[in-house]
Image (cartoon, grey):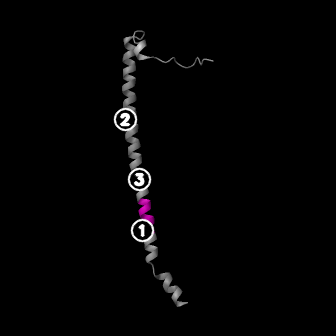
Amino acid sequence: MEDKTRMPKVDVVSDTKKLSPAQLDYMRILEQQNLERVAKLKQLKRKNLITGLSLAAIVVGIYTYSIVAVKQEKFLDEVDEKN
């Protein structure tokens, strides 16, 4: 069963003769806008990755520091020795 709400696919190579110059220009404009949109999305993805990795590094650093700081504490050892 064919879905009549979808637009038919256009093969640019074989259907070029059927398309008007205005339609071809419109297709070029849309293709350029799509390429610009994809470039912006790639840049945004890269920035998000850098931000995520930076935050992960900070969290790991704080966790590591706190583990090392707790191991160096002698307070609990001194309390145990008094008892």
Q: Residue at x 52, y 90 (%)?
A: 82
Question: Residue at 46% across / 74% down in the picture?
Answer: 70
Could you tell me the amino acid type at mark 1? Tyr
- The span from disc 1 to disc 3 (Cα, nearest Å) is 18 Å
Earlier in the chain: of badge 2 and badge 3, it is: 2
- Neighbor class of circle 1 (other Cα within 10 Å; few <14, some 14-19, many 20+) is few
Which residue position is annotated with label 1? Answer: 65
Outermost residue toward the right? 1
Which amino acid type corresponds to the residue marked 2 in the rendered image? Ala
Q: Secondary structure at mark 1?
A: helix
Which element is circle 2 on? helix
The picture places residue 37, in percent across and down from the top left corner, at: 39, 32
Horizontal side of residue 65 vs 3, given as left or right: left
Q: Position of residue 2 (x, y in %)?
A: 60, 17
Along the viewing direction, whichever of 18 and 75 lies nearer the viewer: 18
Above or below residue 33? Residue 49 is: below
Q: Residue at x 44, y 17 (%)?
A: 11
In space, the residues marked 2 and 3 are separated at their CA atoms by: 21 Å
Category of crowding for the residue at label 2, using alpha-carbon neighbours closer than 10 angstroms: few (below 14), some (14–19), many (at least 20): few
Magenta highlight on residue 34: no
Residue placed under numbered mark 3 in the picture: 53
Q: Secondary structure at mark 3?
A: helix
Residue 54 position (above or below residue 12): below
Q: Position of residue 46 (x, y in %)?
A: 38, 44
Say what amino acid the circle numbered 3 marks. Leu
Residue bounds of the magenta highlight: 58-66
User: Image point 50% across, 81% down: which residue?
Assistant: 76
Q: Which residue is mark 2?
A: 39
Q: Is residue 37 above or below residue 82?
A: above
